[in-house]
Amino acid sequence: MQLKAFSRTDIGRVRYNNEDCLFSDPAAGVFAVADGVGGSKGGERASEIFCGVVRDHAQKFCDALNLSTTASDRRHELIELTEAVFQSASEQIYRESSQNIEVRGMATTGMLFAVGKYGAVLGHVGDSRAYLIRDNDVQRLTVDHTLAQEMISRGLLREEELPTFAHKNILARAVGQLPTVRVDTMWLDIKADDSVLLCSDGLYRYFDDDKLGDVIEQGIEFAVDEANALGGEDNISAVYVKVSEATGDNESLDTSVKIRAIQDLFLFRYLSYQELVGVLKIVYEAEFEAGQTIFAESSVGDTMYIVYSGEVDVMKGSLKLTSVGPGGHFGEIAFMDGRRRSAAVVARKDTMVLTINRDDFRALTRTDPVISAKLLWCFVLNLSGRVRDLSQSLSTKKD
């Protein structure tokens, strides 16, 4: 894996100590940013513990990301490893905070990015951010875990009210607040010449997303100096990783391509870009040759399919019911109810599909209540549409 990494942390112009901490290991492909909270000693110590735990696990990430195994096994192993890093750090910070009055109440944000030959994994807690920069287009990958953002997600606060909201910087989730922490994890397929930026709020607070991309392209040193020139109200930290070759197996689709493929699917139409990135960790690719059966009639179904390229025929016995091309989906009924397939599906031509397994889907909805609510609402809308169509069909036949 060919990559270049640049990093810098700076105290800023207002604070008297630096509570941020960085970890950068280009050889292993593992990087982290942490922004500590909890006073002069506590914040520094909390962010230091987090980066230390990342360092201790760096070789495990490197091995897993460069080992040839099944996509499913690799992804599950790396998501679990990411979870383990955050849980270990949270437990250590909480324990030390409980035992030492000088650092009582300390916690930290945590941003972990690991990249290798077969993909990349991202873990996130707090309001530090990760961005994907591709062809001068900047996409924020993470959602801030602040009280304000939580209220916006639940419809209790409007976006336009955010600038005047008194508690907009209070963290709703941080590493070390409790012995365990809920982690946002993502799987990324990186395209050649993509860049990933990890940074604390001391940097991004001064730039909108597009401006941040322009600034960071001029170098980490320039970006930090610009933030200081604009006020430097907080510690400023960033890690900028440039990847010169694509990750994933041969012919693997990159993250942006997969998002475009699923974003119009009925199930995901109300998800934000950041939420769609979170969904990608359960989206896999599969290829079928012309004439190959994807699944048989009456087989037990636990997977939904989205056609990326090619075309498939939906068959009831020897009767062709319909054909499904790029952007279309099939298998969602058995995916939802777990019953046997009502028809067979056969590749009409060489076809690539994206797949989502029901068990992975259930696990996702259990760990993210906001995404869960949106997905369940989409299911309700889809079901009501089917009932309306059926009622209209019966009414037409009676007439």
Image: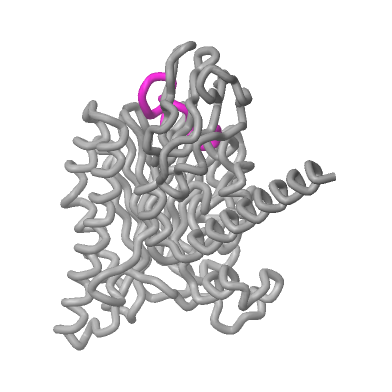
Residue 188, can we see it? no
The quadrant holding residue 189 is top left
| Residue 175 as seen in the image, left or right of residue 218 | left
**Vertical comparison of 18 with 390: above or below:** below
| Residue 372 locus on image (x, y percent) | 48, 61
| Residue 345 as seen in the image, left or right of residue 104 | right
Pick the residue in front: 19 or 384.
384
| Residue 188 locus on image (x, y percent) | 42, 40
Residue at image coords 48%, 11%: 290
How many discs mark residues in the rendered view?
0
Residue at image coords 53%, 45%: 216
Pick the residue in front: 393 or 352.
393
Give the magenta range: 242-257
What predominant SS class does the magenta segment belong to? loop
Q: Quadrant of the N terminus?
A: top left
| Residue 245 locus on image (x, y percent) | 41, 25
Q: Identify the image's colour scheme: rainbow, by chain, secondary structure or one colour.
A: one colour
Q: Is residue 243 magenta?
A: yes
Q: Quadrant of the C terminus?
A: top right
